[in-house]
């Protein structure tokens, strides 16, 4: 396999595991993450057979559809279509601005652009991980973003424009609830402690990515912890909405009095 294709294949495995990690909810053997791990933990399988099974799982088809071991031996009757992993747009590459995966199609193009401008994500593969070592560098990102979109990454723009580094005093922000599913790899970069009386954090040990943002929950499929979290989140948001309504009515009444109108409660 050519070096560029080999790097692309490794990237597919890496970001697919990242996606499976985000979606590992409810936790258990039924998750795609658990099933993918079992493929690579099989000591009796050859490396190409493991890759074959993994790509078949990703494509949602049977292992026999690929036969990577056979292809490596000269029987090239079947292959995995790597172009299915590309985002849309010119100069698209499997390795995008976000090494945990930008996605495919138009959504992938949008996320690739975001991570090439303000939302710079320093994600690499370290020697301590289960993946081949591949350090992330700003030089690589600049080169990718220039070729892909003709833009320059600005990793500190959120801090400069909106004071994301100091939400309380710098941004004067209020009424924000950060929820962190701790099974989600992204949670390591999350805000996991309350920053003020109205900038709150809620950590879910059994949660993953967006476990609390389903349009159905709480359901029987949710863990006890996440069911409880749904109730707590609803109570917090209800209280904030009531506060906003009271503040709005008080502000309107003040404006009317200043205008010379009599306010009747």
Image (spheres, helix red, strand yellow):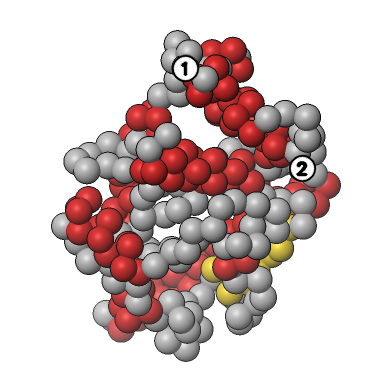
Q: Position of residue 13 (x, y in %)?
A: 54, 41
Estimate the spatial distance between the alpha carbons at disc 2 and disc 1, rounded to whole Å.
41 Å
Q: Position of residue 32 (x, y in %)?
A: 67, 34
Farthest bottom residue in view? 169
**Element type at marker 2?**
loop
**Element type at marker 1?**
loop
Q: Position of residue 10 (x, y in %)?
A: 50, 43
Query: On the rendered structure, is 88 left or right of 58?
Result: left
Q: Is residue 264 above or below residue 97?
A: below
Farthest left residue in view? 150
Residue 28 - label: none
Farthest right residue in view? 224
Along the line of sight, which residue is nearer the eye, 98 or 83?
A: 83
Q: Residue at x 36, y 43 (%)?
A: 4
Looking at the image, is mark 2 or mark 1 nearer the viewer? 1
| Residue at image mark 2 | 27
Along the line of sight, which residue is nearer the eye, 213 or 145?
A: 145
Q: Residue at x 22, y 43 (%)?
A: 91
| Residue at image mark 1 | 74
Q: Is residue 263 above or below residue 65?
A: below
Q: Position of residue 114 (x, y in %)?
A: 32, 56
Q: Hey, which quadrant is residue 196 in on the image?
A: bottom right
């Amino acid at each position: 396999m050519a070096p560029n294709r080999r790097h692309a294949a490794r990237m597919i495995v890496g970001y697919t595991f990242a996606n499976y990690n985000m979606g590992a909810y409810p936790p258990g053997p039924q998750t795609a993450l658990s099933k993918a791990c079992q493929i690579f933990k099989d000591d009796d399988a050859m490396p190409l057979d493991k890759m074959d099974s993994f790509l078949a799982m990703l494509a949602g088809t049977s292992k026999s559809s690929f036969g990577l071991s056979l292809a490596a031996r000269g029987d090239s009757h079947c292959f995995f279509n790597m172009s299915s992993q590309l985002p849309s747009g010119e100069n698209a590459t499997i390795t995008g601005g976000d090494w945990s995966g930008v996605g495919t199609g138009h959504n992938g193009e949008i996320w690739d652009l975001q991570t090439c401008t303000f939302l710079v994500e320093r994600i690499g593969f370290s020697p301590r991980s289960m993946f081949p070592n591949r350090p992330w560098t700003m030089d690589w990102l600049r080169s990718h973003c220039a070729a892909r979109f003709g833009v320059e990454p600005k990793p500190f723009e959120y801090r400069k424009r909106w004071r994301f580094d100091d939400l309380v005093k710098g941004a004067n922000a209020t009424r924000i609830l950060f929820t962190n599913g701790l099974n989600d790899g992204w949670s390591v970069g999350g805000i996991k402690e309350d920053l003020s009386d109205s900038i709150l954090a809620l950590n879910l040990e059994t949660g993953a990515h967006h476990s609390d943002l389903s349009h159905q929950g709480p359901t029987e499929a949710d863990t006890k912890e996440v069911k409880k979290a749904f109730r707590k989140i609803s109570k917090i948001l209800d209280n904030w909405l009531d506060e906003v309504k009271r503040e709005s009515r008080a502000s309107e009444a003040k404006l009317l009095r200043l205008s010379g109108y009599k306010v009747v409660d």
